[in-house]
Image (spheres, coloured by chain):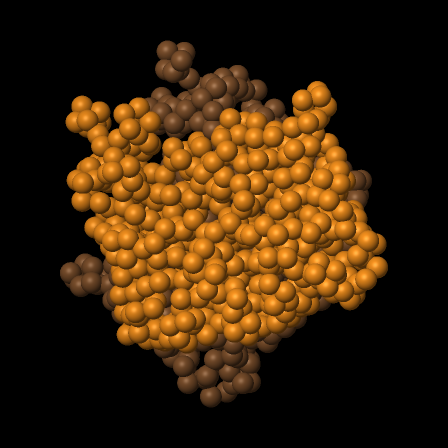
Chain colours: A orange, B brown
């Protein structure tokens, strides 16, 4: 019964249709919506709002908003909102092909932001104010507290700062999720106190988002499932990447730098990071913990394999099969899980304190260890930096993984100079491709190039890379480059579809 | 009397010559030395060691070390050690022309590191172990505690982790410096606690470096002064930069985002940042605080002007005139000053907590807000990233300043694409040149380019920049670039000495 999910009885008469709720949102507003890595997004109101935009635009009326979320949305919502031309500005992350197209064409202004930072900007009025927050919930407590579903993301700060709050109560989300969340908001400056999280297990906040009930303008009842994860199963290359990393970590244990419990693990979203986490199942490591953003299939596989003791994240994003297996038994996992606001899951303070091993995916990296996570060809946005910077900067070990080649071997993921930098050499410790692993710690750029070429570059690109590095080194410099040729691999890819050089293009 | 400076009497017979002390340091060792921004470095032992290297090399014997410091050294020590071919590896910062040459030629392997990170790497055995620490001190306490001089830098962790410690007691450093320092070392993982610094004034540690007296292998008495700061006085352009920033901050106060007390200030080392800090003297702001790394002349001018209440840093680096004025009266300033380990002055946890306004100098920046702090022409190391990344990433406001042109107008400090990235667009809020100020907050790349071109580019480069941006935008993309032309300004500078284009070089 929907009514049972609203324990504060006085709010029960706020239930309206999605269409009616969406009409609180007007042209020019700044709207904060729940949703992080396609989990726990509000589902009905954004859809109704996209329909409103189409109707308005057909009548020549304006309806465009700034949309801020936790991270990516599921259920094709970014697609529908982009195609309805509803979005003028989008912050801080997305992963939708239609929205990506609108961003790259210049229609939608996209602010690509470290995921821990957005609410700092809101709280200090550098961004905002939020007019309306739209939050998916399991239910509402007797005191009016909002219990989130499969993600926390930025929902707590959106709801606390917004003028009006719209709640979507999703009946397909198990009410047993209540108690999973830990909502902590840093105190206000100038007297902000340390964030008291000292282990992945630390519970320091409330199990709900505290909001004055009078701010809740509408409640919508929904029954749409979260989208299933689109992560692919491990393959030959991702298994090799996992294996290289396991060998490296075993060696670190052997020489006494780590124990077999390692340190709290973080893994970025996606196929490769998920595959790497699977690598721990058959490893000698045990009693592991995670302090991560998104908890994927691999987290639950590691629980079931008895390898993982505890996982802290900001969302749970599962494949269809894993969802059907886990969600009916979520109570069995609950004592080993916490979902936090992304400000806390990704907070530099905590990441540095805990000494995290962070594993993130690169689009490409260069021989000196600079990483491009976002821009295809240096110009076209893929998804966004997400939380990779939050983790890479402050991790005990910052690992980036990618397959060494793409497009059937036409493109190398290792290049002389990346076409866009998201993570500088200062923030990158370990690079892994299926070819091997490069340990860049405490190395100067020329030494880094040597280990990257020897260990990570695909054999079909190795001679060309050697040739570039040798000629660059002959010119001198701390970080040798032939500046007029440094981006040539990207130019060739754009012009010919392949990064391989024609002999006559080389500069003597 | 030198003896009076050694209150633990049993250590008094450890006094030896610099030459004798230096012979503790052997080929292949890893040595940690005090010194941060040319302040408080050990002076006699490095000089003796350089002489040892020359003697050894003349006899065909090897003598090379890995040298780790806080940051840059004064008294031409990096020059002398580089020219004696003593250094095989140098971490984490330097600013000496002779050493720079050896780094760029590939003789010295330089690891350019965030200043807050070096001791994390030492503590976790990813770097090290430190064989010998050489620390300048005001004196030694009755319990054997080492009282640093004008910098703390990494000295505390070097001394705590080193096999042997050599102390240089510098009689020219006033003994009244005792009580100025606050030595706090984060507790060990996995149970590291929050760092309890909650305001610039927080004192959370000891006034000396705690070391077992039996580790102290030698004590050397010296009387050499710190080098004077080489910061230039404000000029027309730096005054304009300061003025643009003051106007911006006044506006932030006016719209209610800040109060006239602002938030704790950080300023990078150097002429421009120092000039900007001078700009606060004639401003309406008051009751200011600093939470910075190096405290320069401007800090004391702001104290004397009644504008500054408190300053926390890791070192004090003054001009000759200011040194002679301040040091005899250091007791008058002591209650308003703290010197901390650079791990704490630059700690992400504290910077984020306090909400710092960070002002750092760029070598160049691009229209999208990426900053190059280190590499001339994309290849040749200048000084190093220093603490700029520690502050820029976590600041409430991250400001970068530079003059819009260099080399008499031949070079533009604003370029289509930086030749090396130290700070990505994600970490840069405000850019200032003498031309004006660009507020990049919450803007997408295309919008950032517009405000940078309109506000920061020198008029003699504006048309060429407009032209590039227009043609790049016609190609599309979230961050428009003409990839084959993106670094052309740097190529031209290398080939012709000027970034200005010949018409025929443009690509249609």
Q: Is residue A222 visible?
A: yes
Residue farthest top in this picture: B504
Count of marks overlaid on the render: 0
Query: Would you place residue A336 above or below residue B43 in this image?
Result: below
- B461, B74: nearer the viewer: B461
Where in the figure is residue B205, as x and y percent of width and height? 60, 74
On screen, residue B378 versus residue A224, left or right, reads: left
Query: Would you place residue B418 above or below residue B60 in this image?
Result: above
Q: Residue at x 71, y 49 (%)?
A: A220
Q: Residue at x 19, y 26 (%)?
A: A502
Residue farthest bottom in this picture: B10
Where in the figure is residue B279, as x and y percent of width and height? 69, 41
Where in the figure is residue B80, as x and y percent of width and height? 35, 54
Where in the figure is residue A79, as x and y percent of width and height? 54, 36
Q: Looking at the rendering, in which quadrant would you find the N terminus of chain A? A: bottom right
Q: Is residue B237 visible?
A: no
- A198, A180: nearer the viewer: A180
Q: Residue at x 30, y 69 (%)?
A: A282
């Amino acid at each position: 019964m929907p009514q049972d999910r609203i324990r504060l009885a006085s709010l029960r008469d706020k239930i309206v249709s999605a269409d009616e709720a969406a009409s609180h949102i007007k042209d020019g507003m700044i709207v904060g919506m729940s949703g992080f890595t396609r989990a726990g997004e509000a589902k009905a109101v954004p859809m109704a709002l996209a329909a409103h935009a189409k109707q308005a635009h057909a009548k020549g009326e304006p309806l465009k908003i700034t949309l801020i979320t936790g991270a990516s949305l599921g259920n094709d919502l970014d697609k529908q909102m982009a195609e309805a031309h509803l979005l003028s500005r989008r912050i801080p992350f997305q992963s939708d092909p239609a929205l990506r197209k609108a961003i790259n064409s210049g229609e939608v202004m996209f602010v690509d932001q470290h995921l821990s930072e957005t609410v700092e900007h809101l709280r200090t009025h550098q961004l905002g104010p939020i007019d309306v927050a739209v939050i998916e919930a399991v239910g509402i407590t007797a005191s009016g507290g909002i219990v989130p579903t499969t993600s926390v993301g930025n929902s707590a700060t959106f709801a606390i700062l917004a003028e009006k709050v719209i709640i979507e109560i999703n009946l397909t989300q198990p009410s047993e999720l209540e108690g999973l969340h830990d909502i902590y908001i840093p105190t206000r400056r100038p007297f902000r106190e340390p964030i008291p999280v000292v282990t992945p297990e630390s519970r320091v906040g409330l199990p709900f988002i505290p909001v004055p009930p009078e701010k809740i303008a509408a409640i919508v009842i929904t029954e749409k499932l979260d989208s299933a994860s689109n992560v692919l199963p491990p393959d030959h290359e991702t298994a090799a990447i996992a294996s290289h990393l396991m060998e490296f970590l075993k060696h670190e244990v052997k020489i006494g730098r780590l124990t077999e419990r390692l340190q709290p693990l973080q893994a970025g979203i996606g196929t490769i990071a998920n595959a790497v986490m699977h690598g721990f199942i058959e490893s000698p490591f045990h009693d592991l913990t995670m302090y991560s953003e998104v908890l994927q299939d691999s987290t639950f596989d590691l629980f079931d394999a008895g390898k993982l003791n505890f996982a802290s994240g900001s969302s749970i994003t599962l494949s269809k099969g894993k969802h059907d297996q886990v969600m009916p038994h979520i109570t069995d996992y609950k004592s080993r899980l916490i979902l936090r606001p992304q400000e806390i899951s990704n907070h530099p303070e905590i990441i540095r304190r805990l000494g995290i091993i962070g594993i993130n995916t690169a689009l490409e990296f260069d021989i000196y260890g600079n990483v491009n996570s976002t821009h295809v060809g240096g110009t076209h946005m893929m998804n966004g930096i997400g939380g990779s910077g939050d983790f890479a900067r402050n991790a005990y070990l910052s690992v980036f993984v990618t397959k060494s080649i793409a497009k059937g071997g036409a493109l190398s993921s290792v290049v002389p100079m990346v076409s866009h930098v998201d993570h500088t050499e200062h923030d990158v410790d370990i690079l892994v491709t299926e070819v091997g692993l490069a340990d860049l710690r405490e190395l100067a750029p020329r030494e880094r190039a040597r280990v990257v070429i020897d260990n990570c570059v695909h054999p079909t690109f190795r001679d060309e890379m050697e040739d570039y590095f040798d000629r660059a080194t002959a010119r001198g410099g701390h970080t040798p480059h032939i500046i007029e040729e440094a981006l040539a691999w990207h130019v060739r890819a754009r012009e010919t579809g392949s990064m391989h050089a024609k002999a006559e293009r080389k500069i003597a």
